[in-house]
Image: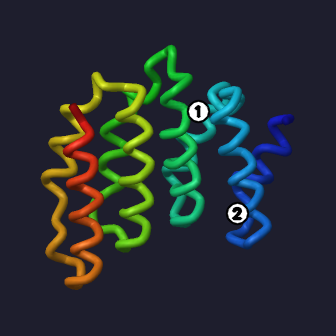
Amino acid sequence: MKKEELLKVLYAEDTLEAHQDILKLEKMSDAIGNLYFYFDELEKMLMSDETYIWLRGYNLICKQAKWDSENKINKIIDKLLDKLDNLDWKVLRKCLQSLNIILLYKSDLSDVICKKIKELNCSIYDKGCKCLIERDINYLLTHIN
């Protein structure tokens, strides 16, 4: 995929078609790691004011853990973890699921990830959402080591 085509998909409006295109990118990346070459662009997406844009970047960065031979994720892990504060509960759950991918391939980051997710303030969420988030956190914590 050419860079122009990739950028069009990454920054497309939040539609069903765009979501399907992102899922295709994720599958391709899982199989062959073709997005690792565009890691810097994915990192730029984290700066977007649009949640759907930075969340795409976040998820795709996490998917690159398998291919991260240059430890680029290690260099931006604080940036990724800072995104977890004060999120909508659905977005937080998606981010936590994506962090699990990093933990699978980058055990050297488990301490910093563990520390951050233990510090998350779940009291800002209503009871039902809080319960789901705490379950996600506990899952991560039990699978860290």
Residue 35 is drawn in which quadrant? top right
User: How would you rate the neighbour count of disc 1 (Cα within 10 Å): few for under 14, some for 14-19, many for 20 or more?
Assistant: few
Residue bearing mark 2: 19
Q: Amino acid at mark 1?
A: Asp
Residue at the spot 41% in from the left edge and 55% down from the top edge:
95
Point out the tag, 1 or 2, that comes first from the N-terminus: 2
Give the total number of marks visible in the rendering.
2
Q: Which mark is residue 40?
A: 1
In contact (CB < 8 Å): disc 1 and disc 2: no
Q: Position of residue 31 (x, y in %)?
A: 68, 31
Q: Position of residue 12 (x, y in %)?
A: 74, 61
Which quadrant of the figure contains the C terminus? top left
Q: Position of residue 65 (x, y in %)?
A: 48, 30
- With 64 as the anchor, is 97 left or right in this view? left
Task: Give the answer, above or below, for where 123 lies relative to 28.
Answer: below
User: How would you rate the neighbour count of disc 2 (Cα within 10 Å): few for under 14, some for 14-19, many for 20 or more?
Assistant: some
Residue 90 is drawn in which quadrant? bottom left
Query: How far, Cα to Cα, is label 1 from label 2?
Result: 21 Å
Q: Position of residue 136 (x, y in %)?
A: 29, 59
Residue at the spot 53% in from the left edge and 55% down from the top edge:
54
Q: Which mark is residue 92?
A: none
